[in-house]
Image (cartoon, grey):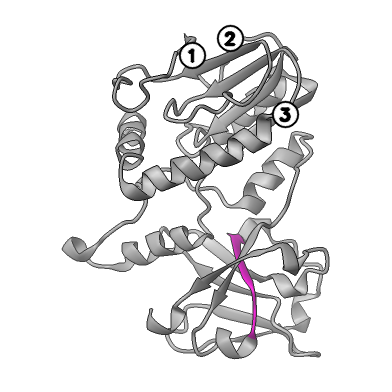
């Protein structure tokens, strides 16, 4: 599927009940995130279905699209497009913007790294970038991955088929490499009730394998597999605690399931716990 077709597919999915729920949820979070950000120039890149700057009070606020082929009348009747441009080559001087809002722009970008580098170029030293995306480690992401496991006609995908859904840790590392300061951390965790997880009591967050920086000697790690034998449950052979597991997503990407109870800097009381019915999957 071409990038243009992917953008159209996302727009169509946003008109479904889950898409409308997501838009309403994201609009509330965006309003809260940008209302107290001050400056002069703010830019939203893509997704006119969201009014990402409506709660902000900067005097100059613009919406930019990189595709003008699809009609906006029904999907975003109040959207006023200020400019059409490539998101990885923005027509702004360096250090000229105070706020960038990027709703789902990275997922459909030809080169997500370049689009982030461009954001770093145009933002002022104290500027902010607000990024929205679908979390592959969320319950919705897990439902999507289970749908991909079904054969042919039985396959029912919950989210759009295309787009590179970027895990939080992966995105955080990209931003830090560009000297961005990342606000916030883990917001939620998955509580699985399968025969193994229920007894172990872990709270899980899924990240890309390259986001794991193991400081323990690999020789101190033992591995346990059961059932389908596809997931490597790694535990300390000294104390028996399992800090993480390893597996492969249906799209072939290597993934890590991190036990957040093993991360002392994570405030478990502030996490949103999502129940996952692993006993029946």
Secondary structure, mark 3, is: strand
For marks 2 and 3, give the CA distance.
18 Å
Q: Which residues are magenta?
A: 201-208
Residue tagged by mark 2? 91
Q: Quadrant of residue 76?
A: top left
Residue 141: x %, y % from top left? 46, 58
For marks 1 and 3, give the CA distance.
20 Å
Disc 2 and disc 1 in contact, CB within 8 angstroms: yes
Residue tagged by mark 1? 85
Disc 2 and disc 3 in contact, CB within 8 angstroms: no
In the rendered view, does 131 fall on the left or right side of 172? left
For marks 2 and 1, give the CA distance.
7 Å
* Quadrant (top left, top right, bottom left, bottom right) of the C terminus: bottom left
Residue 6: x %, y % from top left? 34, 36
Residue at point 68%, 23% (across, down): 99
Residue tagged by mark 3? 128
Residue 191: x %, y % from top left? 57, 75
Residue 181: x %, y % from top left? 79, 38
Is 247 located above or below residue 117 in the figure?
A: below
* Mark positioned earlier in the residue sequence (1 or 3): 1
**Which secondary structure class fits the magenta region best?**
strand
Secondary structure, mark 1, is: loop
Is 223 located above or below residue 155 in the figure?
A: below
Q: Nearer the viewer, mark 1 or mark 3?
A: 3
């Amino acid at each position: 599927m071409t990038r243009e077709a992917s953008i159209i597919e996302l727009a169509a999915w946003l008109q479904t009940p889950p898409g409308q729920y997501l838009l309403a949820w994201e609009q509330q979070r965006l309003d809260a995130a940008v209302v107290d950000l001050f400056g002069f120039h703010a830019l939203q890149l893509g997704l006119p279905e969201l009014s990402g700057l409506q709660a902000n009070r900067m005097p100059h606020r613009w919406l930019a699209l990189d595709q003008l082929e699809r009609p906006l009348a029904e999907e975003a009747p109040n959207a006023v497009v200020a400019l059409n441009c490539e998101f990885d080559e923005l027509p702004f001087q360096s250090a000229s913007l105070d706020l960038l809002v990027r709703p789902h722009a990275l997922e459909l970008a030809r080169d997500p790294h370049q689009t982030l580098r461009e954001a770093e170029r145009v933002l002022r030293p104290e500027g902010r970038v607000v990024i929205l995306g679908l979390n592959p480690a969320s319950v919705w992401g897990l439902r999507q991955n289970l749908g991909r496991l079904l054969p042919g006609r039985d396959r029912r995908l919950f989210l759009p088929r295309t787009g590179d859904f970027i895990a939080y840790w992966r995105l955080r590392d990209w931003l830090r490499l560009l000297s961005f300061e990342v606000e916030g951390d883990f917001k939620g965790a998955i509580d699985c009730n399968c025969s193994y997880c229920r007894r172990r009591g872990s709270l899980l967050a899924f990240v890309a394998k390259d986001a794991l920086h193991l400081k323990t000697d690999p020789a101190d790690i033992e591995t346990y597999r059961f059932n389908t034998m596809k997931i490597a449950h790694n535990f300390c052979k000294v104390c028996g605690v399992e800090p993480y597991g390893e597996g492969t997503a249906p799209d072939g990407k290597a993934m890590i399931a991190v036990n957040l109870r093993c991360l002392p800097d994570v405030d478990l009381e502030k996490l949103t716990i999502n129940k996952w019915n692993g006993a029946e999957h």
